[in-house]
Amino acid sequence: MSDETNKTVTAGYKRDWRIGWIVFAGLMVLTLIEFAVANLSNPSAVLLIIIGLIKAALIVYFFMHVYRLWREEKHG
Amino acid sequence: MSVGTVEDHAEHHGVELSPEQQVKANRFGLWLFFISEIFLFTALLVARFFLWGNTRPELNQVVGLIATSVLLISSFFVYRGETAIEHGDKKRFMSNFLWAALFGTLFFIGVVVLEWNIFGLSGEIAGIEIFGTLKPTDGVFGGVFFAMTGIHALHVLSGILLLLAAWYNGRKNNYSATDNWGVEGTALYWHYVDVVWVFFYPALYLIGTAV
């Protein structure tokens, strides 16, 4: 592998690693918001469902890579 | 009558798939399986909202929050493991999948020992009872709660076995940066189990008035 390719791989690896941290942090924050909303005096079920949908969308897109279903495959 | 091999059949009909096409087909098949499972989990959610309405049983909120966090942490480790093998980093793939299996097991134990309280324990932390008191025979609350958490726990258990199988195959050098469908498929399944819990958690613990 050339030095240039190595640098690209390392940069891509670091970027993917960072995305993982950001998505995980987002999921944890949304979970805490859910918990706080549910413990209000009059919690909104609609708001809780919307937060759940956002969390699911984050997991499906970033962790499950749903876009790979339509993308041309690089790996064998 | 002679019976040809699969390879003979594929060659005769010209349908042999390239490795790239095979991965795409595997991926598509797994997503179709996920879609078929949506019917099961949606049925359970419909049962919950129809039978419980705007009420829910008195469940330990802290246990629910911790269980949810533990499952999210395990998903995070699975993402890291999958990312690692895709970049040829076998060592990190192995350690992250092992951590994911550990956190998945913690979630499973949390549900079975704390929420289901199969050992009939009791104990308090800061004045709050941490062991569940709900039983499967406790009317619609018990029935729906145990059906939802039971079906989900079964998926968690199978996911843990898949994580350990992927880890074992990794140990035997069966994966590389370009050939890792076993890891990707396992990761997809584990994240799917997490997505299901994303909807089950508010439905069981948060929505409605505790009675």
Image (cartoon, coloured by chain):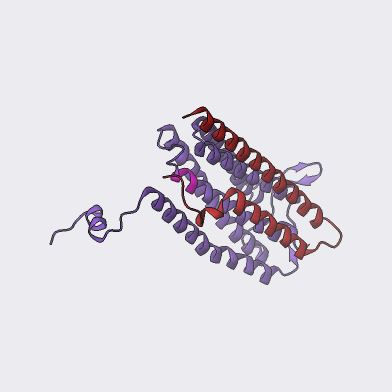
Chain colours: A red, B purple
On the image, the x and y values in percent for residue A17 come to: 62, 38
Q: Residue at x 48, y 40 (%)?
A: B164
Identify the magenta region.
B181-185
Left or right position of A25 against B157? right
B163 vs A57: above or below: above
Asked whether B116 or B137 is in front, the reply is B116
Which quadrant of the view contains residue A56?
Answer: bottom right
On the image, the x and y values in percent for residue B62 come to: 75, 47
Tell me the quarter of the image containing the N terminus of chain B: bottom left
Q: Is residue B128 visible?
A: yes
B43 vs B113: above or below: below
Left or right position of B137 against A2? right
Q: Residue at x 44, y 58 (%)?
A: B29
The number of numbered badges drawn on the structure is 0
Tell me the quarter of the image containing the C terminus of chain B: bottom right
B53 vs A31: above or below: below
